[in-house]
Amino acid sequence: MPTEKEMVNLIEVHNFTKTYGDNVVVKDISFTAKDGAITGFIGHNGAGKSTTIKAITGVIKPTEGTILINSIDIAKDALNAKRQFGCVSDSPDHFLRLSGLEYLNFMADIYDTPSEVRADFIEKYAKRFGIYDSLNNTILSYSHGMRQKIMIMGALIHDPSVWILDEPLTGLDPQSAFELKQMMREHVEKGNSVFFSTHVLEVAEKLCDEICIIKAGELLYTGTLDELKATHKSQASLENIFLELTDTKEQQEELS
């Protein structure tokens, strides 16, 4: 295990606030997504998850606060910071007129991925996701799940050390969801970082090393799942703890 001095907090969010006029969407939150760990970002719709992810990836600017990717301030050196991560958004409906292969080569060109490296990546992961025979078809003809798979591949084709995934399992068939979860675990075992949002608390409980819980733009908890459970009943599930923290037990059936 690396020492504390050797550890690198691959995503650092310091006192991030985002407002639109008088509306405070996210209020003064701070957390890190460490190397060698899968960090889950959970909260109800409208809690501020997507806003935070958009700020981390440089899509929007913080009203206040600092965000670092591999120690690079994304506000001061956006191009360098954006080369550090691969991002999968919560919508896969992009570049629909391109074929899957054209899209992947387009993404590889953006990141200067060498021809041999991209070819090996495309073959390996298209077969792993079961879409190899559909690469020459337009993304418009793909199902939602197939579009999600091609977007995941496009985000990861330059082998970034940081993965940022916004609801990445939505629309995936069970086999592909299994493969993605395996890929996430393989990635962090190499000392890299995965930060992903999810509504599926059972998945977060089984997969995550660290948890961030957000409600109404405020961070309620950040730390390990074991540390979180230690403050509650020993048999409490993440779902029960989440509902207790957010005071929304009446929504339990919707999340089950």
Image: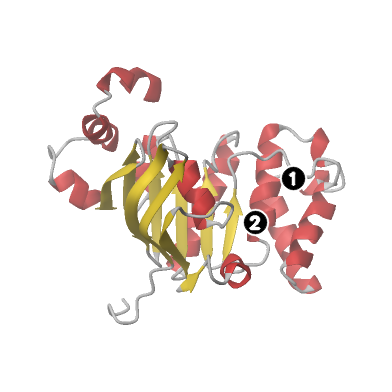
Q: Which type of secondary structure does the marked residue at label 2 adopt?
A: helix
Query: As displayed, is residue 82 above or below residue 170?
Result: below
Quadrant occupied by the C terminus = top left
Q: Is residue 147 visible?
A: yes
Query: As displayed, is residue 228 above or below residue 199?
Result: below
Quadrant occupied by the N terminus = bottom left
Q: Is residue 224 visible?
A: no
Q: Please state which of residues 1 and 39 is positioned toward the viewer in this rendering.
A: 39
Quickly name the residue at label 2: 155
Residues at marks 1 and 2 touching, judged by CB atoms closer than 8 Å: no
Please give the name of the residue rendered at 63% of the width and 59% of the height, measured from the top-left corner.
156
Q: Please state which of residues 23 and 215 is positioned toward the viewer in this rendering.
A: 23
Residue density around tag 2, few if under 14, some if 14–19, many if 20 or more, within 10 Å: many
Tally the numbered discs: 2
> What kind of residue is marked 2?
Ala
Q: Which type of secondary structure does the marked residue at label 1 adopt?
A: loop
Please give the name of the residue rendered at 84% of the width and 54% of the height, measured from the top-left corner.
102
Quickly name the residue at label 1: 131
Please give the name of the residue rendered at 51% of the width and 63% of the height, measured from the top-left corner.
162
**Quadrant housing residue 87:** bottom right
- In the picture as drawn, the residue positioned furthest to the front comes out as 21
253 sits to left or right of 50: left
Residue 188 image position (x, y, % from top left): 45, 63
* Mark identifier at residue 168: none
Residue 45 image position (x, y, % from top left): 44, 31
**Quadrant housing residue 42:** top left
Please give the name of the residue rendered at 77% of the width and 49% of the height, measured from the top-left corner.
132
Residue 180 image position (x, y, % from top left): 55, 49
